[in-house]
Amino acid sequence: MTDLLANADPVPLAQADDDARAAEARAGVVVRRLDALDDLHAVHALYRSIWRPDDEHAAITVEVLRALTKAGNHVAGAYAGDDLVGMTVALNGTPDSGHVHSHIAGVAPSGQGRGIGLALKLRQRVWGLEHGVRSIGWTFDPLVRRNAHFNLAKLGALPVEYLTDFYGPMSDGINGEDATDRLLVSWRLDRPLPAPGAAPEPDGRPALVHHPEGDVPLVTESTAARVAVPTPADIEALRGASPVAASAWRLAVRSTLAHELAAGSAVVGFDRAGHYLISRKDNA
């Protein structure tokens, strides 16, 4: 993805802190780092309530959280009064890499749509800048439209790599039996945030996936320098309503988006209609 903010002045720590405070105020939460054992139990309970994993496929445990915080990693919670309504866990990268990987982040269903996720990420950004971290990476399901919009259009994170069935079977309440394909993004912490409403309107570039209403998606071809990869409107609902169509979407986006990134194409945006906007290698 082309970094449209690469030449902008670096964001000072004070500005990043102001951004985080403003996001917390809008969301009605306070985000704080957590390391007390009772707090980590609350983080784990919130994680289980959101993802509903079976014991074999749990992504975190209280014991792992305890070890991570002792080693200086980032575990934080968003509180509305006394209620924990959001959480995030990040792991330090290799020594001296200046990179952190955000392993998991979630918001309670009762708190969704309030901007709590943004408050968590911006407070994570402050922590990173305080500790000399230059970038934070994380993965997300490329079929989940709202997450793509949040990561690319609201935060300005840059797609790096398509990871096929990255975690293997998870069998939780969110992923179901679907393959765990993920898009890896990297977020430069010293870049300013995109302007509000930065997601572009569709610009008419040809789509690499054709999806007539009610039909399963089909991969198409184009020699255009700029192309688009659409996403389903609500993949989570589609998994329950039509597993066949959901699986077809997975394979269609995998074969197009993964191919483009492997070939050196750049994801230059995510538009308001739910399309990844691609600029091919010689035009990136």
Image (cartoon, helix red, strand yellow):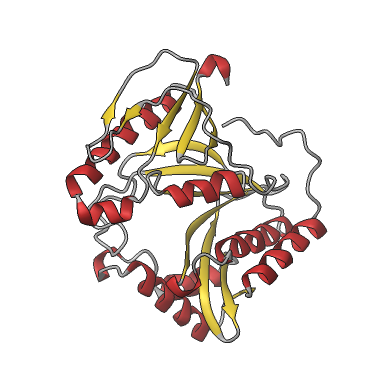
**Residue 258, percent from left and from top:** 38, 31
Q: Residue at x 62, y 64 (%)?
A: 119
**Residue 236, percent from left and from top:** 31, 55
From this viewpoint, is residue 34 visible? no
Q: Residue at x 61, y 30 (%)?
A: 2
Q: Residue at x 43, y 21 (%)?
A: 263
Q: Quadrant of the C terminus?
A: top right
Q: Describe residue 54's horizontal placement relative to residue 68 as left or right.
A: left
Residue 17, placed above or below residue 253: below
Q: Quadrant of the N terminus?
A: top right
Q: Residue at x 58, y 73 (%)?
A: 78
Number of numbered labels in the structure image:
0
Q: Describe residue 246's horizontal placement relative to residue 221 as left or right.
A: left
Q: Is 247 or 204 nearer to us in this picture?
A: 204
Q: Describe residue 227's horizontal placement relative to residue 13 as left or right.
A: left
**Residue 186, percent from left and from top:** 56, 43
Q: Is 70 or 159 nearer to us in this picture?
A: 159
Residue 75, placed above or below residue 203: below
Q: Describe residue 217's horizontal placement relative to residue 30 as left or right.
A: left
From this viewpoint, is residue 66 visible? yes
Residue 283, placed above or below residue 111: above
